[in-house]
Image: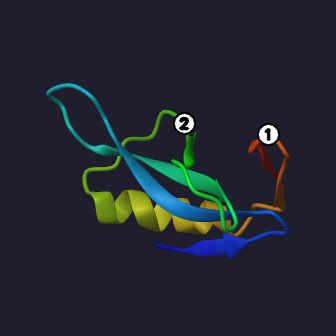
Amino acid sequence: MARKAFDHFEAVSAVVPVPGEGGGYYAAIAVKALGGSGAPRFHKVLEGRIFKTAHEADDAAAKELTHLKDVKENTDLLW
């Protein structure tokens, strides 16, 4: 898991399981307010790509996280 901190938010690489019988994982970036409580907001990245393992999906998400410039007030990602 990779992490990137901004002024008010932190973003971490994450994975989202693909629903259904086929299985697999989507690469994602989870965003949460720094020092805040509550659930993070997950943003799928590399839409349409399904990875066989969680490790592969997290590696891909970590690579995408390096391109993230900031997180907007509403937790949208700014590339």
- In primary-sequence order, the first of circles 1 and 2 is 2
Residue under numbered circle 2: 47
Toward the left, the furthest residue is 21
Q: Please, is residue 73 above or below residue 64 in the view?
A: above
Tell me: 61 left or right of 58.
right
Tell me: 1 left or right of 75.
left
Contact? badges 1 and 2 (CB < 8 Å) = no
Q: How many marks?
A: 2
Q: Residue at x 82, y 52 (%)?
A: 79
Of residues 13 and 34, the one drawn nearer to the viewer in this rendering? 34
Residue under numbered circle 1: 74
- Decide: few, some or many residues near mark 1? Use Cα within 10 Å; few <14, some 14-19, many ≥20: few
Percent x, y for residue 17?
Answer: 31, 41
Toward the top, the furthest residue is 20
Q: CA distance from mark 1 to mark 2?
A: 21 Å
* Mark 2, secondary structure of its residue: loop
Q: Amino acid at mark 2?
A: Glu
Q: Residue at x 76, y 61 (%)?
A: 68
Percent x, y for residue 18?
Answer: 31, 35
* Mark 1, secondary structure of its residue: loop
Percent x, y for residue 16?
Answer: 39, 44
Tell me: 58 left or right of 61.
left
